[in-house]
Image (cartoon, rainbow, N blue to C red):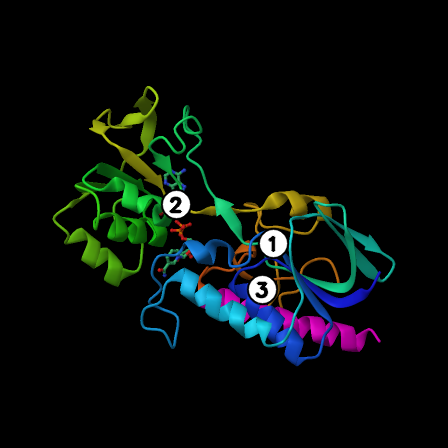
Amino acid sequence: MSEYDLIIIGGGPASFSAAIYAARYKLKTLLITKELGGYLNKIHLIENYPGFKEISGLELAQKFKDHINKYNIPIIEKEVIDIKKHNNHFLIITKDNKEFKTRTIILALGTEKRKLNLKNEDKFIGKGISYCYICDAPLTKDKLVAVVGGSDSAVRAASLLVKYAKKVYILYRKEKLRGEPLEVEKILKNPKVEFIKNVNIKELKGDNFLKSVILDNNKEINLDYLFIEIGSIPSTDLISKLKIKTHKEGFIIVDSKKKTSIPGIFAAGDITNTPLKQIITASADGAIAAHSSYEYLKNSL
Ligand code: NDP
């Protein structure tokens, strides 16, 4: 079994930049991910990544892939199911039971969509409930649609949905949307949008398909689609097996060098306790983590 200096787990912006930096430090690197591009592939429009005034997530992911291809970094598209510490190295096990040996790891696994955890939520997935406005927006042509959430994803979702839907409700549990002010201002001016503040959804109604939601003020809103954009939670299975230190919500605690509580394991991007989860911050995290891996290997010779 060949031994790597670094294995990067994950396939988003943090992983791409970690791979580029690792290649330039001449680390023997492998990237393992379930899906190259990850959540980036699902972003409709990016307007805050320097150098690109407007670019889709898919296009940016392609550019990142082209960039890492320049360095011939091997990529394995498989799910990692376990990580074991063995003397001075780690063993990474993928779902097809293959093992990979490495001296350092960067965890850049990103996050999964948070659910409302309401009765019937799972039953209506694909039948009126969606967690992916990019994928499902075209289905909402001339339909009644609601987005639940009050931050950037909810605002972005509403901005795309107004292009298709007859009407878009934004349902938020607080007073004032907290997405990017420029986008919030734009969406609230749209005549197709109705912002309903200080509400939570308490019930999802329908037979085979979602028909309406009941709010906690007892108002019922008829809907064809509900987009749940209430943030994300870290992918915890692997993290809990590792017994790595996490924040109470499950995000991995890292220091300014992206070191975790386990020597030799670094973490980058949305899976960490970083306060601003953006493509640019994930990319920067990846670069720092790769540099820290390089320093760690140099100092442990
Ligand atoms: P966030 O965690 O930023 O926001 C989640 C939203 O959902 C909040 O408004 C929160 O309410 C609300 N919420 C959470 N749980 C519930 C619940 N159980 N019921 C009802 N509402 C709930 O998630 P996002 O996906 O919006 O963004 C994640 C990160 O990605 C952020 O850092 C964001 O800035 C970034 N992002 C940036 C974009 C951009 O274009 N710049 C686009 C998309 C995301 P409350 O406000 O009360 O906490």
Up/down of 144 relative to 63, above or below: above
Q: Amino acid at mark 2?
A: Cys
Prevailing secondary structure of the magenta residues: helix
* SS for dot 2: loop
Left or right: where 298 falls relative to 60: right
Which is closer to the viewer, label 1 or label 2? 2
Up/down of 31 relative to 242, above or below: below
* SS for dot 3: helix
**Residue 31's x, y, as percent?**
65, 62
What residue is shown at x 35% (from left), y 22% (from top)?
Answer: 208
Quarter of image, res 106 = bottom right
Q: Which residue is mark 2?
A: 132
Residue placed farthest to the left in the image? Answer: 191
Left or right: where 180 falls relative to 219: right
| Residue 297 painted magenta | yes
The answer to whether marks 1 and 2 mark residues whose Cβ atoms lie closer than 8 Å is no
Q: Which residue is mark 1?
A: 252
Left or right: where 167 falls relative to 204: left
**Residue 250's x, y, as percent?**
58, 47
Which is closer to the viewer, label 1 or label 3? 3
The N terminus, quarter of image: bottom right
Q: Amino acid at mark 3?
A: Ser
Q: Which residue is mark 3?
A: 15
Residue placed farthest to the right in the image? Answer: 87
